[in-house]
Amino acid sequence: TMGGGSLGGMKSIHDHGGMIDGIVHIGEPNWWAQGGDMTPEAFGLMRAQELEAKILELGVENVGAFIGEPVQGAGGVIVPPSTYWPEIQRIVDKYGILLIADEVITGFGRTGNWFGSQTYGIKPHIMTIAKGLSSGYQPIGGSIVCDEVAEVMGGAGDFNHGYTYSGHPVAAAVALENLRIIEDEHVVEHVRDVANPYLWTLWKGLEDHPLVGEAKLAGLMGTIALTPDKESRAKFASETGSVGYRCRERCFANNLIMRHVGDRMIISPPLVITPDEIDIMIARARKSLDECYAGLKTDGLMVSA
C-alpha cells in the first residue's frame, strides 16, 4: 500500500506522510488542463521528455524503472497525446531503464486490446494487474514479468514477497474462468469492433454541450472535462471538484454511475455493453449535463477562475 501510494501522484495520499524515499515524479500528459497554446502532439513530446531530463538530473545509474498507466485512471482518465508513449519507450530503451505498465485498470479488454500497452504500442518489462483478471468477482492481483526480469529473479534464490492470503485457490479459479469467458465470448473484440466505434461518435458529440470542453475515449474508458469557457479551457472559480460533484449527483439521480475526479467526469461501462445500452447511457449523460448546467447558471457558478 505504501509502495503504491508513493509511486502514484495523488496529493491526498501523499499528505498522510510516510511515503517511500527515492521515488520521483514527472508531469502528467494532461493536455486539456496543462497544454496551454501547445498542440497535443507537441505537449505529449514535452511531457515525455521530462523523463529524459529527470534521468540526466538524477544520474542514469540511480534510475531503476519508469512506471505509469497507459491511460491514467484515478487521475481522471487522462488519455495521453499520441506522441507520449512512443517517446517514453524511446527514452527507456536509450538508457536501459525498465518500463513498468500499471494495467490494473487498462488490462483485460478495457482499451480494446487485452492490455493498454498493446493499444499504445509499448513493450513493458513488467505489468501489474488486478481486478480485470477476475472482472472484480474475486480479489486478485499479480505482476507479469518479461523473460529478462524473470531470469534475474530466478537466479537470486527465493522470491520472498507476498501476503498470508496470496494465491487463494478460489480467486485463481474465478480468474481462470473469467479469462475463458472473455476469450470464448470474444469480449475484447466486442469492445474494439462494436462498443468503442459506436460509442465514439456519441461520446465526442457531447462536446457540443455548453458545459463540456473535452470528451475523450480510450476503448471503454470515457472522460469529460467540465468548463465554464470552452475557448480558454478555463477552470471554474468555485472550489475544484464542486462542479464535478454536482454533475455526479445529477448522474446518480438519473440512474447513471459516472464518477467525478475534480471537475472531470469519468465512466467505464461494462465491456459487454450493447449499442442499445450505449444509447441509454448517452441519453442519461446528456440529461444530467443539462440539469447540472441549468443549476450552475441559476446559482451564478458558470464563472472562470
Image (tube, helix red, strand yellow):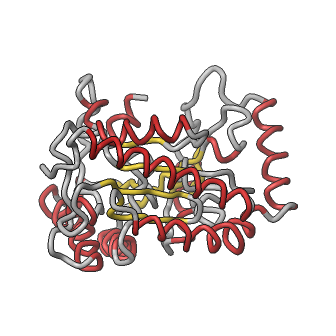
Residue situated furthest right in the rendering: 184
Residue 264 position within the rendered picture, expressed as x and y whole percent measured from the top left: 36, 49
Q: Which residue is at a point 34% across and 77% down the rendered structure image?
A: 83
Query: Quadrant of the image for the N terminus?
Result: top left
Toward the viewer: 289 or 125? 289
Q: Which residue is at a point 57% across and 50% down the rendered structure image?
A: 284
Q: How many numbered tags mark residues here?
A: 0
Is 122 left or right of 219, judged from the image as shown? left
Residue 114 position within the rendered picture, expressed as x and y whole percent measured from the top left: 66, 63
Q: Which residue is at a point 54% across and 35% down the rendered structure image?
A: 253
Toward the viewer: 24 or 290? 290
Residue 13 position within the rendered picture, expressed as x and y whole percent measured from the top left: 31, 30
Is 261 left or right of 305, judged from the image as shown? right
Q: Is residue 252 above or below residue 208?
A: above
Residue situated furthest front in the rendering: 298
Toward the viewer: 281 or 291? 291
Residue situated furthest top in the rendering: 164
Q: Which residue is at a point 71% across and 56% down the rendered structure image?
A: 277
Residue 267 position within the rendered picture, expressed as x and y whole percent measured from the top left: 52, 50
